[in-house]
Structure formats: structure tokens, C-alpha cells
Image (cartoon, rainbow, N blue to C red):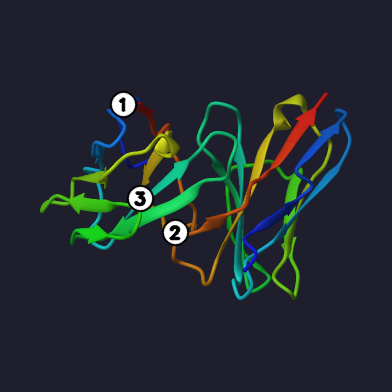
Amino acid sequence: DAKTTQPPSMDCAEGRAANLPCNHSTISGNEYVYWYRQIHSQGPQYIIHGLKNNETNEMASLIITEDRKSSTLILPHATLRDTAVYYCIVPMDSNYQLIWGAGTKLIIKP
Amino acid sequence: DAGVTQSPTHLIKTRGQHVTLRCSPISGHKSVSWYQQVLGQGPQFIFQYYEKEERGRGNFPDRFSARQFPNYSSELNVNALLLGDSALYLCASSLVIGTYGYTFGSGTRLTVV
């Protein structure tokens, strides 16, 4: 089973910041949090990952709480092209696999 | 640079047949993983290969097999196809094992009739 829980769906207005939450209360001290997204009918796309410090790249920012039990992916200025299913994943090193939950379906509205 | 390429993009097979799906990783990437994605669900892990050796296997029957070649490309084979094998099959590559910022291909859409 996935180690993360996410809301099934969210809406966001175009141009506004989209904040996608994720709970990972059983995360271990050395486990990273990864975020991917999947636009309809395409392969998943890696967005960002982090351990305990906040991270930012050209696509998004990742805010991880101090206790590391939850995180938030922030798309600072959402566009219609950001409509996708967003997955928060804590990988299992024991089998080198990513266990995908249902993700959050983010719909950006004009 | 070319991304992860998968072939074919679509195919239709009959129950009981065999299928081979192919994947070319990004140049220099030595790790290849395979995932199955049934419509409406997240991907499910099938295999991971690194340096031509199997390093991880998901909960799939023995009808599923894979291999990685010296040039790091990979094949996924499925024997005795069932209707339930209809899915999008995704290949992902990474530079080394143990990092998870994978680059995925666009997938092969397999329909079993």
C-alpha cells in the first residue's frame, strides 16, 4: 500500500497558486518524498523531491513540515496545462519500486 | 537528447497470445523499470533492471518477464495474454538505482480482445 494520502480532487483558478497537500505520517527519517504528475494519456512526469528542507525548481516548490508527516506541492502560477493527476510518493528502497496511490486530480479553470 | 522511447505505441492482441514491448532508456541511464497502469488507477510496479540484472519484482504472475540488454535497452514479455492485461505499459529510466527521479516514456497501450 502507498504510504501517502492525498485528496482525490482539487480545483484552482488559472494564474493562482495551486497548493496540493499530502500526508505521509509513517515516513522514516531517511525517506524522501517525491512528486510526479500525469497529464491525460501521457507517461508520468517527475516534478520535485525532498527530504526535510523546502525545495524549489523551475516547475514547483515543495514544502515539508518540520515533523515530516506532511508536505505541500506548490505550483506558483497555475496554467491550463497544469491540469493533471498529481502523485505524492514515498519510495520503498527494499524493492526499488514506486508505489502509486490514486493521486489528486487537479483541474485548472480559466 | 531523445527521451525514453517505447515501441509500439499501441497494439491489439488476442487472448492467449504473447507480446513483447520494447524500451530504450535515455542515453547513459543504466536503470530501467516497468509499470502497468490500468485505466483509472495509478501505475503498478512490475520490474526493475540495473546493469542487466533484475533488482526488483512486483506482484505479477510468472507470465510476465523482462530482460535488459548490454546497451541498457529492455524488453517486457507477457505470455498467455488475459483480458485483464489490457493496460498502458510504462517504461522509466534513471541514471543509477536507488534514485527515483525517473523519466518515463509515453507508454505502450495494449488491448487484449
Q: Which residue is found at the position 10% from the left and 53% from the top?
A: A66
Count the marks: 3
Q: Which residue matches tag 3? A: A90
Q: Which residue is found at the position 42% from the left and 31% from the top?
A: A102
Q: Earlier in the sequence, mark 2 or mark 1?
A: 1
Q: Earlier in the sequence, mark 1 or mark 3?
A: 1
Q: Which residue matches tag 2? A: A94
* Mark 2 vs mark 1: in front: 1
Mark 1 surroundings within 10 Å by alpha-carbon count, few (fewer than 14), some (14 through 19), many (20 or more): some
* Amino acid type assigned to the residue bearing label 3 in the image: Val
Chain of the residue where label 1 is placed in the rendered structure = A
What is the CA distance from the residue labelled 2 to the residue labelled 1?
32 Å
Residue A32 at least partly seen: no
Q: Which residue is found at the position 79% from the left and 47% from the top?
A: B8
Q: Which residue matches tag 1? A: A10
* Amino acid type assigned to the residue bearing label 1 in the image: Met
What is the CA distance from the residue labelled 2 to the residue labelled 3?
12 Å
Per the image, label 3 sits on a secondary structure element best described as: loop
Q: Which residue is found at the position 75% from the left and 43% from the top?
A: B9
Per the image, label 1 sits on a secondary structure element best described as: strand
